[in-house]
Image: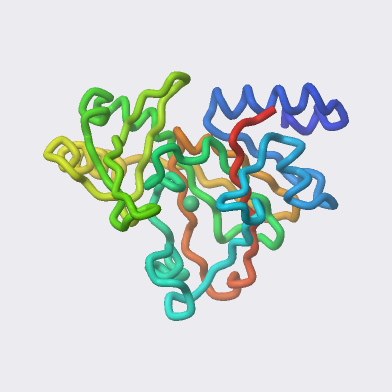
Amino acid sequence: MELRRLNGHGLSLTMNLRDQVLERGYALMPTWRPERSAGDVATSLGEPLSLGGRDPVHALAPAAKETSTPNTYSGLYGVQGFPFHTDMAHWRVPPRYLMLRCVVGFREVPTMLIDGAELAREVGLKLLARAIVRPRRPVLGQLPLLRIYQPMEEGAILRWDEVFIKPASRAGDEGSAQFREMLSHCKYRSIVLAAPGDTLVIDNWRMLHARASVPSGCEGRKLERVYLGRLH
Ligand SMILES: [Fe+2]
């Protein structure tokens, strides 16, 4: 893989990582520096975000519905597959990039990706830019009005999450219904993070992701997640 061949050439590596993420929406680096911590790797790739001043590295592990916080994906879906979504879709400006890194992995539990920008073009950018949605629950005491497709100075934010946001206008209803319909027929890519150090960087303003269901025997899956504001 292109990025592996560049191992040892730090600058070229990170330039190529960003190019690849911007071009394809994601980049996979198999067994990427498994001896280093997720925090170190994230810092070498971009600018880690500490949400609310907390540790930028989040441990992700399958959890049964009963033992999870309500209103989280695990609380709602447990070890079932998660629906496709972008992360922090209920924020005005969701984190741009997301890094997932394997600690303990299983081929049986892939991370699935869909190019949301492509999907949005098929649905119609005009409709989605008018499609007003809002968080289901207040964010910092507020329920901001957001758009499924939100052009920005540089690029655009695509937000999709049926758990955390809901339509808040007629165009919001229509855009959500059409997007959901298109999504249900959409082909996805399965990315396997199975070996320690397998690292996936996703453009969270563009790609939808989902976790496959966790069959018995794979409950020990462990990933680390870091949000990145930008890539070097
Ligand atoms: Fe997610």
Q: Residue at (57%, 34%) from the top-left corner? A: 26
User: Which color scheme did the rendering employ for the protein?
Assistant: rainbow
* Camera-side residue of 91 and 106: 91
Locate residue 163, reporting x and y percent: 33, 56
**Which image quadrant: the N terminus?**
top right
Q: In screen coordinates, is 168 left or right of 78?
A: left
- Residue 79 sits above or below residue 103 on the image: below
Locate residue 109, reporting x and y percent: 55, 59
Locate residue 130, reporting x and y percent: 21, 29
Q: Residue at (52%, 31%) from the top-left corner? A: 25
Q: Residue at (31%, 42%) from the top-left corner? A: 183
Quarter holding residue 75: bottom left
Q: In screen coordinates, is 95 left or right of 183?
A: right
Q: In screen coordinates, is 86 left or right of 97?
A: left
- Residue 155 sits above or below residue 189 on the image: above
Locate residue 42, reporting x and y percent: 71, 42
- Residue 18 sits above or below residue 97 on the image: above
